[in-house]
């Protein structure tokens, strides 16, 4: 019984035992907790909900819009994408988008862009895209010279050797 003049207290929620194996402690009051404080701290990372895997966006934040609709007649990017599949190194979605937009043609058949600037984070396929473009220019687009640049000689040699591996790994290119 409550003393005279005091307010009656709200009924306390029943506390349940911790559901961890062998634990005899009580879970915090409120009914929403299944584990005692100690086991809740240990289990917190395992109980977090994982976010869906992020794949990024193939279209960049800043880019030059095309002059007209990009089709096989208005860009050579589709040819480059097919060439990449033939070599056994198909493009990722952003690389395909880049090829189609970067190799846009003017109405007279020349390339719209003389310089292409690509800003992508490390380890996302910039070098493999550049190697494929270089090989495509040599084998399909009839370029007589392709100049590759790297920040030091070791990286330039590495890219050159990877180009040679691609050539030797594809019978059509090796012939």
Image (tube, rainbow, N blue to C red):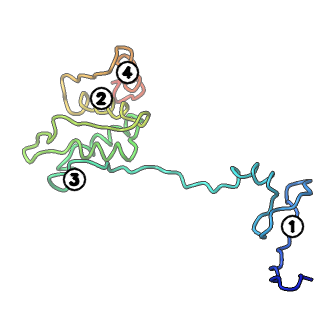
Identify the disc placed on residue 16: 1
User: Which residue is at a point 33% across and 20% down the rendered structure image?
Assistant: 151
Q: Dot 2 corresponds to which residue?
A: 135
Marks 2 and 1, how far apart in space? Answer: 68 Å
Looking at the image, tell me whether mark 2 or mark 1 is earlier in sequence order: 1
Kindly indicate the quadrant of the structure image that contains residue 153.
top left
Q: Which mark is residue 164?
A: 4
Kindly state the secondary structure of the residue where label 4 is placed. helix
Q: Earlier in the sequence, mark 4 or mark 2?
A: 2
Q: How far across and down, in percent of the image, does residue 68 sit?
A: 15, 55
* Quadrant of the rendering where the C terminus is positioned: top left
Q: Residues within 10 Å of mark 1 (few under 14, many from 20)?
A: some
Q: Position of residue 161 (x, y in %)?
A: 39, 19
- Mark 1 and mark 4 in contact? Answer it, CB < 8 Å: no
Q: Is residue 150 left or right of residue 106?
A: right
Q: Assign the N terminus to one quadrant of the image.
A: bottom right
Mark before the other along the chain sequence, 3 or 2: 3
Residue for point 39% across, 28% down: 171
Of the image marks 1 and 3, the number of the one nearer the N terminus: 1
Q: Could you tell me which secondary element the residue under label 1 belongs to?
A: loop
> CA separation, marks 3 and 2?
22 Å
Q: Which mark is residue 40?
A: none
Mark 2: secondary structure = helix
Which of the two marks, 1 or 4, is nearer to us in this view?
1
**Residue 66 spot, x, y in % from top left:** 18, 51
Mark 3, residue position: 71
Separation of residues labelled 1 and 4 (CA atoms):
68 Å
Rendered position, 164 above or below 48? above
């Amino acid at each position: 019984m409550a003393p005279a003049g005091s307010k009656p207290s709200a009924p306390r929620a029943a506390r349940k035992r911790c559901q961890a194996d062998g634990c005899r402690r009580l879970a915090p009051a409120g009914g929403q907790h299944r584990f005692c404080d100690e086991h809740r701290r240990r289990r917190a990372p395992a109980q977090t909900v994982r976010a869906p895997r992020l794949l990024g966006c193939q279209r960049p934040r800043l880019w030059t819009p095309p002059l007209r609709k990009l089709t096989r007649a208005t860009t050579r990017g589709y040819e480059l994408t097919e060439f990449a599949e033939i070599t056994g190194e198909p493009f990722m979605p952003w690389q395909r988008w880049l090829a189609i937009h970067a190799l846009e043609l003017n109405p007279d058949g020349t390339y719209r862009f003389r310089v292409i600037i690509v800003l992508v984070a490390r380890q996302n396929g910039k070098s493999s895209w550049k190697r494929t473009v270089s090989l495509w220019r040599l084998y399909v687009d009839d370029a007589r010279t392709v100049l590759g640049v790297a920040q030091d000689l070791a990286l330039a040699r590495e890219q050159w050797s990877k180009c040679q591996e691609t050539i030797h790994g594809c019978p059509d290119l090796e012939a």
